[in-house]
Image (tube, helix red, strand yellow):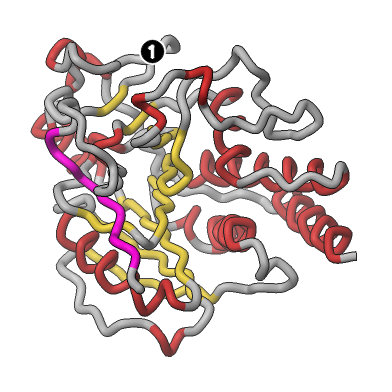
Amino acid sequence: MRSNRKMLLLISFLLSLLLVERHFRNHQVKEIRLSDWFNPSKRPDVITTTDWGAPVIWEGTFNRHVLNDYYQRQNITVGLAVFAVGRFVDEYLELFIRSADKHFMVGYKVIFYVMVDALFQLPDIELGPLRTFKVLKIIEGDLWYDLNLLHMKNLGDYIVGYIQNEADFLFSMAVNQVFQNDFGVETLGKSVAQLHGWWYFKNTKNFPYERRLWSAACIPFGLGDFYYDSSIVGGTPQEVLTLIDKYLKGVVHDTKNRLNSTYESHLNKYFFINKPSKLLSPEYNWDPKFHLPPQITYIKVAWQSERG
């Protein structure tokens, strides 16, 4: 009964995405030429370019001065959406926002879209210049038992309702992370995927893709490019909305087939079919519990330690 109700809710939301007139910002940012700012030869120790020509951003491969000169003239606004419910608000949100205020897109207009279930729990944070803080109430409905589904459905609603008219680029991030160094405009692109810190250094054949052939998230054995981490995803608001649309359609398909594939499995299937235009190295999402390999020298974002 609950799965049928979930499917009906998702179908209703998908129809709303199809029917809505999408007025994305008229200010369409043209991407700078890759050769003007990206030098893959600086990091021969790692993969810096994919088979489809997308850059993999590692420290040392990019010229931020060239990028800043370009994007500052474009007068861009970057959105950062974060989802926090229950104990995650008390334990992680304040440090996430404070560290993002210090390191995320320094010198650019940033809107923090904070999606929470209880407004009174919000920490009192004074942001720096060019930063705006917007609180968005999570509408739970019958999806409270699946936080990823709840997160992405609400983010899709708010992209359609607000974000598409306010931001040129959008990142959605897990709240239990902390910025440690600059997360700058080298990360901007039409469709941005985050490489998984653990699986990047493992054999492709061992990636934990969804393998059940009847799942919408299935990537059959012998196929696949990289394993992507679901804790960070970015791009233009329109591209992020497209990802959400495909994910929700995949959930509907799997629900009909009595399957329950993870959000990360659907994300990996999406990026397998729809190749990202930019990949972020594990430097942008590192778990301190992992052994630090020599390729990782400059951690931009790290997982916060779990609190008892």
Compared across the picture, whether 4 is left or right of 162 comes to right
In the image, which residues are magenta?
297-306
Quarter containing the N terminus: bottom right
| Front residue of 166 and 237 | 237
Q: Which residue is mark 1?
A: 53
Q: Residue at x 70, y 47 (%)?
A: 248
Snapshot quadrant of residue 210 = top right
Residue 250, how many percent across, how many down? 73, 41
Compared across the picture, whether 85 is left or right of 31 comes to right
Residue 287, how many percent across, how many down? 30, 47
Snapshot quadrant of residue 245 = top right
Neighbour tally class for label 1: few under 14, some 14-19, many 20 plus, Cα within 10 Å: few
Tell me which amino acid carries mark 1: Gly
Q: Residue at x 22, y 14 (%)?
A: 35
Q: Residue at x 31, y 24 (%)?
A: 56
Q: Residue at x 74, y 70 (%)?
A: 142
Considering only vertical position in the picture, is 297 above or below 219?
below
